[in-house]
Image: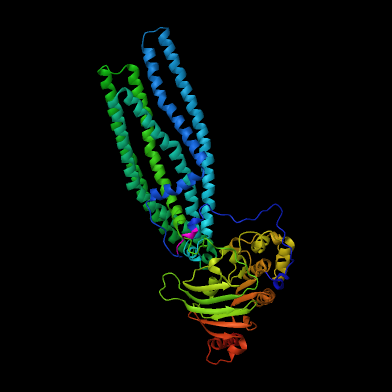
Amino acid sequence: MTDNHATHLPTTQPQAAGIVHHQSTPPHRDEIAGAKASGAKPRRRNAFAAVFGFSARYWARQKPLFGGVLVLATAATLMDVLIPLYSGRLIDAVTGVRNDATFDAAVLALISMIALGVSAVCLRHVAYLGVVRLTLRIMSAMALDSFWRVQRFATDWHANTFAGSTVRKVTRGMWAIDTLNDNMLLALWPACVVLLGSTVLLGWHWPLMGVAVLVGAILYIALTLFLTVGYVGPAASLSNQWDTRTGGALADAISCNAVVKSFGAEGREDALLARIVAKWQRRTTRTWNRATINGSAQAVMLLALRALIIGMAIWLWWRGRATTGEVAYVLTTYLVIQGYLYDIGSYIRDVQRAVNDMEELVAIHDTPFGVADRPEAKPIVIDKGEIVFDRVTFHYGGHATPLYQDFSVTIRPGEKVGLVGLSGSGKTTFVKLIQRLHDIGAGEIRIDGQNVANCRQASLRSQIALVQQEPILFHRSLAENIAYGRPGATMAEIEAAARLANAHDFIARLPKGYQTLVGERGVKLSGGERQRVALARAFLADAPILILDEATSSLDSESEALIQEATARLIEGRTAIVIAHRLSTVRALERILIFDQGRIVEEGDHATLIEKPDGIYRRLFDRQVLGLVDSEAA
């Protein structure tokens, strides 16, 4: 950063007390290197495989905690498996001859059952505490990773995606991991332990009984999986898609409420949402009906298994191969198995719902970044602000014809350049490519001799100040909005920037001054006020390169004069690029580039270009001057 533009503000930039600024790094940086071009679709995979693979990465980050929960859940479940064994011994003891031996056996069985029960409760309690910690850690990591990823998607992705839908996908996926963890670690895994342990114990006494229980359980689980994954799952996935659309439609209408009101279109928006909700209702009805059929099928299977096991127990007793206590043991074991099997059905349904809820979040993580930092990317250092387009070829995804073909132009350090042309001529794309919001197909874009494709995007954009045609402000205080370009700026620096942007006076008149909240996207401020706040932000950022998307055409004359005065101060000492909508704003610039269909067809200062009677600039200028004269005459 050169001295000539650093003199606009105090040179000291102390950090706010106690605040440490750092760049967070996601856990899987290798994904960036493999990112595909913008517009590429995410990889399609089986939903269960995709979700469990995604979840496994987060479980792997918490290996000690994850493993500890599994061990505790296993131990607690084994206690449940052993309790029926001692209940059978208790029955044998109390139905036998009354003597000291049978009394001692009954007491020992009772004590064993109590000890096993207490152990199970304690172990399960600690396991639950572990799952709470595990789930909250994973939910937090998922939220941060998803936000990190969405923030770095290309501008095309954000332009084509509802913000409300994205929020819905992330939050729904976060809560789904809670359901998945509970059901996998505290339900399905213990159920498998019970089935295996009970089968081994029953098979130890009566091999045929063990085989029957094992086969029946496997058939039940297979039927449940088939119905849940193959029958209910696809319907639930489609239902979730319409749930996402509902969230997107709500966010779209609410965020554009001012437009709705201006056209008295509340009824139309009600009708639009009603159509979407009706579609969601039909899809969800089908999903819930299928889930009900699934539950009834599972109940029938459990009845058949119950009849089989009880029938075999009676047969063993009749043949004299099982005592009364052993029959009680079989019945008690079956009750435990039935409880777990019945729960397995609901657990699998819950897992299926969690998978469906996480599916769209996983798809976000499978989506390529579009524009990604290269593995060897380094921070860019901009001192002079020279910009060079060297034989650049670029076309938007889906367009066969390039917008730029072997396009070359140089903007000298500190030069003030205006961009003029009809809509679609390539002006906005030009400044987007400087910021590397898109990747080019061929050639190079260099700033101070450094290829922007080899530089870190955050480093590049932090040294380019952008004032947009429609400034976007955060629903935060005015001070925070102005200081966004320089975290940790002092109030003195914020006020100095506001004064340079002619914004201090209107801010000082507000009841809370610089602490005033501006509303979502700055709706509490007028267009001129938002523009001056954006200029103040650019002053405070003090970047060597400035891009201005001139936006005074819709403002009153007083606001326009204040903004033009502030803009004149802002461009001093910097390389400035001004996208001109009103040609009066570029008359004083050193060079004007006239774009037409991705080519620079004219260039020079205002005096040179106005002398070309058949030139595009002269035609546009005459049209605007005549329009101004006509409006004044009217």
Locate the N terminus by quadrant.
bottom right
**Percent from the top left, x then y, of residue 333?**
36, 26
Q: Quadrant of residue 625?
A: bottom right
**Percent from the top left, x then y, of residue 175?**
49, 46
User: In this rendering, is residue 278 above or below 337?
Assistant: below
**Percent from the top left, x then y, of residue 266?**
49, 62
- Relative horizontal placement of residue 333, taking residue 387 as reference (left or right): left
- Relative horizontal placement of residue 634, taking residue 317 as reference (left or right): right
Instruction: Give the magenta range.
Output: 32-36
State the residue at coordinates (43%, 17%): 109
Q: As rendered, which of 98 and 518 lies closer to the eye?
A: 98
Q: Quadrant of residue 524?
A: bottom right
Locate the C terminus by quadrant.
bottom right
Residue 289 can be seen in this image? no
User: In this rendering, is residue 12 above or below 24?
Assistant: below
Q: As rendered, which of 200 and 139 lies closer to the eye?
A: 200
Q: As rendered, which of 463 and 227 lies closer to the eye?
A: 463
User: In this rendering, is residue 600 above or below 17?
Assistant: below
- Relative horizontal placement of residue 483, taking residue 161 as reference (left or right): right
